[in-house]
Every structure is written in structure tokens, then in C-alpha cells.
Amino acid sequence: MIDIQNNFDPDLRKIIKTKKQVAIIPVGSLEQHGPHLPVSTDSDIVTEIAKRVAKKCNLLLLPTITYGISFEHAPFFNLSVTRTTLQNQLVDICISLGENKIRKIIILNGHHGNQKALSGIADKISKTSRDRNKVFVISYWQYMKREFDHAGFVETSLMLAVSNKVKMDLARKGLVVEKMPPKQKSKISKLASIHFIKATKTGVWGDPTKATKKDGKMILSEIVHNIAKKVSKLPY
């Protein structure tokens, strides 16, 4: 792994010249995660996953983009950018990477609200770079068996594994949808994508009260293993 922001120009130019490099860009968010997790939760988790995948696959690790699209969490705290802003920033970064002869890029998404903005980003960058840059978008929660939540068991367990900022004494059970009929679950999911607080009341989707560091380490290991496997099969 080469951590871009902690490296030096002569070394980086030599590394890039020696062999074709693959870059990974983590993208998170700053938004409410209930009373027990910090607003940096998405960014913290995706940063650690990216770091581990970069080590496992020998990638160039870029700094995390910590601002995402979280307007749906209002009026609870969120620092959000528009879809266009996030897309433009990523296009500019990827084009700049290409100009530095780094043409294979993985965008690792850590926030569900970023998905629409990232859905067509690979094609957009490909056209802008005249097909010289290849971009692959990966949302980390799609590489684990457990169903994803928001400040529930999974996210809280992951944060216990990667951070010391969790306040478990403040963890409270939120909206639990496991036993809901599919139609009701779909309806509340659509509401959450627009007004998360109306759907969950407390801003927590799931039950964080039984989350553990041990579970977090297991889930983290599973995610990193599966993403590394996917990365190893990506074409140039």
C-alpha cells in the first residue's frame, strides 16, 4: 500500500513509473448516527476498509472524501454537498490521477445516500478521459452477509472495531424492520430515503444495543476479504 498523502513527489513518480498503479478513493459522509455514534461514522468505517483493502491488494490509497449527500437526515445534523458537487469533485480527481498515469481507480462508497450520484460516475469519467481511465464503484455493505443498517448492530459493531469514539451507554434500539412484511418494509425504506427521521424517529435504523467489537472485527474481515477478491478480478 502507498498512502498518497504521506508520500513524497520523487518517490511517487518513481513508483508510478515502475508499474501500473491502482488507486482507491474512499467516500463517506458527515451526518447524524443516533446519540451513540459520531457524525464521522461513515467516513471512519470506509477509511479503515479502504486502508485494509489497499494493504491487501497493494493499492494507492487516497484521502477520504468526508462530505457526502445526506440531506435526508435533516433536521438532524448533516453537512451535505449536492449530487453535482460530489460528481464533479470525483471527476476532477480521477482525471487528475489519469494525468499522473494512474488510470485504474476504485471509488469505495461508505454512505447509502451517495449511491445515486455514483451510479453513472464511471461512464462520465470514461467519456471525459476518452476511455483512458477505468473507474469501478464499490459500496462496501454489498460485500457482507448481514443486512445493512444505520447506527444499528452492524454499523455500531464496525465502529467498535475501528474507533474509540462509540458511546455504548447511549445506544438505544431504533427502527427494526426484520419482521415487517416486504410491502411495509419497502414503503418505509422509500420514506427513509427522503425523510430519514420521519421513518426512524430517533435516527437509528436497527438495534445497536447488542453490538460488540468482536462482531465488528468479524464483519470487517468479511468485507475486506470479499472486496479484495473483487478488486483482484477487475480488468485494466
Image: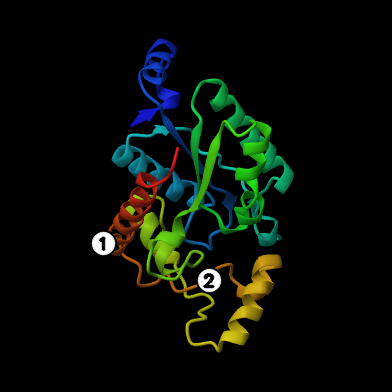
Q: Is residue 66 above or below residue 1?
A: below
Q: Earlier in the sequence, mark 1 or mark 2?
A: 2
- Residue 205: numbered disc: 2
Report x, y in % for residue 50. Answer: 41, 43
Query: Disc 1 marks which residue?
Result: 214
Residue type at mark 1 is: Lys
Residue type at mark 2 is: Trp
**Residues under numbered marks 1 and 2 in contact, where contact means CB atoms less than 8 Å apart:** no
In the rendered image, the quadrant that contains the N terminus is: top left
The residue that appears at 69% across and 61% down in the rendered structure is: 72
Q: Is residue 121 above or below residue 63?
A: below
> Is 189 left or right of 171, judged from the image as shown?
right
What is the CA distance from the residue labelled 1 to the residue labelled 2?
A: 21 Å
> Is 73 left or right of 152, judged from the image as shown?
right
Quarter residue 116 falls in? bottom right
Q: Nearer the viewer, residue 39 or 138?
A: 138
The residue that appears at 42% across and 45% down in the rendered structure is: 234
> Is 22 left or right of 196, judged from the image as shown?
left
- Residue 1: numbered disc: none
Mark 2 neighbour class, 10 Å CA radius: few under 14, some 14 to 19, many 20 or more: many
